[in-house]
Structures are given as C-alpha cells and as structure tokens.
C-alpha cells in the first residue's frame, strides 16, 4: 500500500494535536509537515507527548521543494482556511476539511476550483460516525414527527453558531418536512433570542461552555409523546476514525465531496 504523506494545519491546537497523534499512529500515513502560529520551531512529536520525529512546526503553510504532501488536513477556522485553500489546490494537494463557518458560496467555490484543478477535497461538519447516525435517525423521525427543535452544545472556543452539524441536520430534515411555524401563534420572547434561531419553523439553540466537546440533541414532539435523539463526543478521539478514512479516500475523486456518510462503506 502506498504511503500517504500528510500535513496538518493548526497542529498545535487541541484538535490539531489529536490529529497529529492519529496520523503518526495510523498505518499507511506519514506526517511530513505541521503548521501553526503557536509553538513554531517545536518538534511536533515532543509537543504532543510522543517521541521527537523531526517534523518541526512551521508558522505558515509552504510547500518545500524537498518534501511531497499528498493530503493536508485543516481544522483551523474559516478565515485561516480561506487564506490557504487556493494555495493547497494550486499546489496539487488533496484537502480534508473539518473547519466550519463557511458560507454555501465559499464551499461551492472551493469545490469548483478543486474540480477544475483535478484535486480532491473532502469536507464534513462532523467526523464522528455516531453523529452521522444521529442525523440519519433524525431525518427518519421527522417524517412522522415534524415538530422539531435542536440543541447543540460545544466548547466555548467554537466561534460559529449554530454548528455545521446542526445546520446539516436542519437542511436534511427540511427535505422531508414542510416548512411551518411551531409553537403558539401568539408566542413572544421576553428576552430576544430566547426561542433560538428559526430555520423553516424549526428552532435551533446553541450552547457554548467550557468542559463540553461536541454534542447535539434533536427533540421531536407529538400528541402525548416526545422523542429525543442525542449524540455526544466525549473526547476528540471520536473524530479520528472518520478523519483517517477521509485522508485515505480523498485522492479517489476530483472536486468536493461533502459529508462523512458519503464515504462510509
């Protein structure tokens, strides 16, 4: 099996460190570069509590002539990704993106550029297999219980709200549920925003607190009954299997593939 050379953006962050560990431990993958504005010039192996491996954290992305990068993994933030994505694609590097907060227009532009450049890009709002199942079950439930509210909970360093997972869940549910107003016709908010965001009548509530990782509960209501479908990522390790799978598959296509469910066996 061909070894895939991997670079990680945001390597010194909490998510980046877990990704670097996973890449180092994953058969068939080779970590060749790490980028982060924090801890430049540090050996990434030493930083993540492993043996030094000679990969020194660089402040900004660059493709050195003496190294080959097959796939870059980006879990930074929307602005940082947009500053670099054209460079990745122009350099012929496939990209796995977990960064959220991008607009539909920005996502479409990335997909179009990748397709025209014969580069593969994979993007997902959530890389946990349990989260994919949560969305699948919620879509099925919405066919029968169309009164829906979502509570999504994340750590307090997450910048965008609602989460990409919540938005994708709402998008998919809207395909099987007609838009309508939920709740009393005359309801009002004594504190603005108390009822959450409104997406085709469905309400979405975002919680940001230290101690959380990534959690989502989809609540359904019907006559005399409720249904709750919930997924909890207790640690960032929950995302690693999905990320490693995406890294191994992203070179199989040109353009953008969106959503982990599209590459699961």
Image (spheres, rainbow, N blue to C red):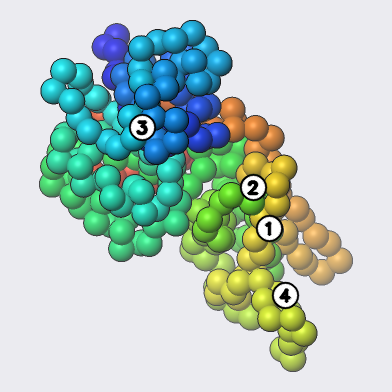
Task: Write the residue at 70% across / 75% down.
Answer: 195
Residue indicated by mark 2: 155
Circle 2/circle 4 CB separation < 8 Å: no
Tell me if I can see residue 26 in this picture.
no
Circle 2/circle 1 CB separation < 8 Å: no
Say which quarter of the image contains residue 181.
Answer: bottom right
Answer with mark 4 or mark 1, whichever residue precedes in sequence.
4
Residue indicated by mark 3: 35
Task: Write the residue at 40% across / 10% down.
Answer: 53
Of 106 and 55, nearer the camera is: 55
Task: Write the residue at 55% across / 61% down.
Answer: 161
Q: Position of residue 56 (x, y in %)?
A: 36, 21
Of 189 and 171, nearer the camera is: 189
In space, the residues marked 2 and 4 are separated at their CA atoms by 20 Å
Direction from residue 143 to residue 246 in the image, left or right: left
In space, the residues marked 3 and 4 are separated at their CA atoms by 40 Å
- Which numbered circle lies on residue 34? none
Of 168 and 17, nearer the camera is: 17
Q: Secondary structure at mark 2?
A: loop
Residue indicated by mark 1: 207
């Amino acid at each position: 099996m061909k070894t895939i050379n991997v670079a990680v953006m945001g390597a010194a962050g909490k998510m980046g460190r877990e990704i670097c560990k996973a890449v180092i431990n994953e058969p068939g993958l080779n970590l060749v570069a790490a980028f982060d504005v924090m801890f430049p010039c540090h050996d990434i192996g030493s930083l993540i509590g492993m043996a030094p491996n000679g990969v020194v954290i660089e402040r900004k992305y660059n493709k050195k002539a003496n190294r080959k990068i097959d796939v870059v993994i980006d879990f930074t933030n929307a602005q940082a990704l947009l500053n670099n994505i054209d460079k990745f694609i122009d350099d012929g590097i496939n990209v796995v993106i977990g960064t959220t907060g991008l607009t539909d227009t920005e996502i479409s532009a990335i997909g179009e550029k990748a397709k025209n450049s014969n580069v593969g890009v994979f993007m997902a709002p959530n890389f946990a297999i349990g989260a994919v199942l949560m969305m699948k079950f919620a879509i099925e439930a919405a066919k029968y219980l169309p009164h829906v509210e979502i509570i999504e909970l994340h750590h307090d360093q997450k910048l965008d709200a609602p989460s990409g997972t919540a938005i994708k869940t709402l998008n998919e549910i809207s395909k099987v549920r007609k838009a309508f107003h939920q709740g009393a016709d005359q309801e009002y908010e004594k504190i603005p925003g108390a009822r959450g965001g409104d997406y085709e009548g469905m309400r979405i509530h975002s919680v940001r607190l230290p101690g959380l990782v990534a959690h989502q509960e989809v609540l359904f209501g019907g006559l005399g009954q409720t249904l709750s479908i919930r997924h909890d990522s207790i640690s960032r390790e929950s995302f690693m299997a999905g990320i490693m799978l995406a890294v191994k598959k992203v070179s199989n296509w040109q353009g953008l593939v969106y959503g982990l469910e599209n590459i699961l066996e």
